[in-house]
Image: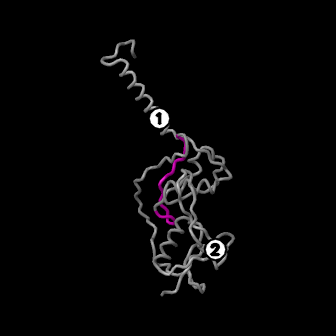
Amino acid sequence: MPAPYRICCIFPPDVKHYFWRDEQIIDAYNRPKTRPLFSSSVRDAHRFFQEASAIGFRDHFRSLYPRNRIFIESLSGEGPLFENKGVQPQTDSIDRRQPVFVEITDGKGFVVRPAITGAHGRCWCIRVIDVPSMTEHSGLESIYGLDPEDVIRRMLEMWATYRPEPFTPSFIEEQQKAEIRAAIGEIKNQLHPGRPRPGDL
C-alpha cells in the first residue's frame, strides 16, 4: 500500500491547518451542500492513500480558497508534493458567458458576472459596484467562486458585517414590466375580442 498523504492549508497568520472531513450545511436556498473542515491538529488530518485523489481534493480546495496556500505533504511533513500535476487554470481570452441574476427572495437577489483570472481560471465573481447597498465600501475586493451560487454563498460570508442587501436589477424590472403589459393586453383581448373600438383602448 502506498504511503498516505495529507492536505495542508495555510490560514492567516501563517498557521498550518489540515483537511479533516466534509461538513454538511444548508445553503441560502435551503439546499444541502458540503464544505471542507480544517483542523490545526495534525492528528485530525485525513489520510489519502491515492495520489490522484489527493491531487483532486487539493485542486478543489484551491478553487474554493484561492487566497490560501494549499498543498499536499507526506505524513512525515515532506512537501509540497505533486505541484506539477493536477488541473491547470483555464486562461481562454474569449468568454461568451453572460451575467446571471441569482434570486434570494421575492424577486430580489444579486448579479454575478463571469470572469477569467490567472489565479482562478474560468470562474464567476461579484464586485462591490454590482451591489447598490455596498457602494460606500468601494475598497473591498471582488468575490470569486466556481459558480454563481458559490459566489453568493462566499459573498454573504465574507461581507456579512456590511450586510449586502438583495435588490431587483433594472433588466429584471424591465422584464417584469413587459410581462405585466403582456398580461394586461391578454386580459383586454379576452374582454374585447375582435377589432378593438376606440373606447376600448
Q: Amino acid at mark 1?
A: Gln
Mark 1 in CB contact with mark 2 (< 8 angstroms): no
Q: CA distance from mark 1 to mark 2?
A: 48 Å
Of the two numbered discs 1 and 2 on the same chain, state the one appearing first in sequence.
2
Rendered view: 172 above or below 122: above
Q: Check disc 2: other Cα within 10 Å, few if <14, some if 14-19, many if 20+.
A: many
Image quadrant assignment for residue 139: bottom right
Q: In the rendered structure, which amino acid carries the disc numbered 2?
A: His
**Which disc is residue 184 wearing?**
none
Give the residue displayed 59% in from the left and 66% down from the top.
67
User: In the rendering, at what x and y percent does residue 110 appear?
Assistant: 54, 47
The x and y percentages for residue 144 are 54, 59
> Is 104 rendered above or below residue 116?
above
User: Up-down: is 191 above or below 26?
Assistant: above
Q: Which residue is mark 2?
A: 17
Q: 21 or 75: nearer the eye?
A: 21
The dominant secondary structure in magenta is strand
**Magenta highlight on residue 148:** no
**Residue 176 circle label:** 1
Quadrant placement of the C terminus: top left
Q: Secondary structure at mark 1?
A: helix
Residue 163 rendering spot, x and y as whole percentages: 65, 48
As rendered, which of 83 and 152 lies closer to the eye?
A: 152
Q: Quadrant of residue 195?
A: top left
Q: Residue at x 68, y 52 (%)?
A: 161
Span highlighted in magenta in the image: 107-121
Q: Residue at x 54, y 50 (%)?
A: 29
